[in-house]
């Protein structure tokens, strides 16, 4: 099987980002078939250059999958941008404590009793001699 020179070189993530989903999936299929051929060559005692290429191809597959998943996540973010409720994996992470903390509005709210108390017994102001 003749291979294109593009599949021989390590794929770069920034180049993959400009490709469409179909192109990425096609690239993924190419890389997987290439990996399969390399594994066959490994079993049948292939050249050392082929054996060392297995790692490169595996990493390239990982890069393609990473870009596909990043694109998918970005599309989900766009879809839920103005929605009130979002899927858990695209909500802000922060920390567990921060997520459970009262909102600033809730934290500054006062009870009726404390409002009345503040009105009837205001903070005393003292004139301090300079």
Image (spheres, helix red, strand yellow):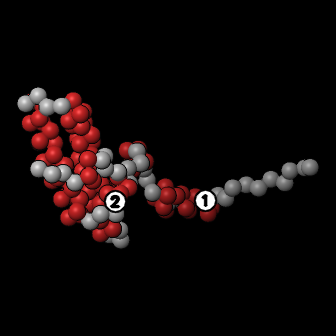
* Within-10-Å neighbours for mark 1: few <14, some 14–19, many 20+: few
Task: Report the residue at 14% width, 31% height from top.
Answer: 46
Camera-side residue of 97 and 115:
97
Observer able to see residue 121 = yes
Residue 92 in the image, given as x and y percentages of width and height: 38, 54
Residue 104 in the image, given as x and y percentages of width and height: 49, 58
Q: Secondary structure at mark 1?
A: helix
Whether residue 108 sits left or right of residue 35 in the image: it is right
- Residue to which mark 2 is pinned: 17
Whether residue 70 sits left or right of residue 40 in the image: it is right
Alpha-carbon span between mark 1 and mark 2: 60 Å
Residue 111 in the image, given as x and y percentages of width and height: 48, 59
Residue 19: image tag: none
Q: Earlier in the sequence, mark 1 or mark 2?
A: 2
- Residue to which mark 1 is pinned: 118
* Within-10-Å neighbours for mark 2: few <14, some 14–19, many 20+: some
Q: Secondary structure at mark 2?
A: helix
The residue mark sitting in front, 1 or 2, is 2
What residue occupies the far right of the structure in this picture? 130
Residue 84 in the image, given as x and y percentages of width and height: 33, 67
Compared to residue 13, the image places residue 81 above or below, namely below
Tell me which corner region of the image, top left, top right, bottom left or bottom right, holds residue 75.
bottom left
Q: How many marks?
A: 2
Camera-side residue of 115 and 73:
73
Camera-side residue of 89 and 1:
1
Task: Report the residue at 27% width, 40% height from top.
Answer: 56
Tell me which corner region of the image, top left, top right, bottom left or bottom right, holds residue 54.
top left
Task: Report the residue at 11% width, 50% height from top.
Answer: 1
Tell me which corner region of the image, top left, top right, bottom left or bottom right, holds residue 88.
bottom left
């Amino acid at each position: 099987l003749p291979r294109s020179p593009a599949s021989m070189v390590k794929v770069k993530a920034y180049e993959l980002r400009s490709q469409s989903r179909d192109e990425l999936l096609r690239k993924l299929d190419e890389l997987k078939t290439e990996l399969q051929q390399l594994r066959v060559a490994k079993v049948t005692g292939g050249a050392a250059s082929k054996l060392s290429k297995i790692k490169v191809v595996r990493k390239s597959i990982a890069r393609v999958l990473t870009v596909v998943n990043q694109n998918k996540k970005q599309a989900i973010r766009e879809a839920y941008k103005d929605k009130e409720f979002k899927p858990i994996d695209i909500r802000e992470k922060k920390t567990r404590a921060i997520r459970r903390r009262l909102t600033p509005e809730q934290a500054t709210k006062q009870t009726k009793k404390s409002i009345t108390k503040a009105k009837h017994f205001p903070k005393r102001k003292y004139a301090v001699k300079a």
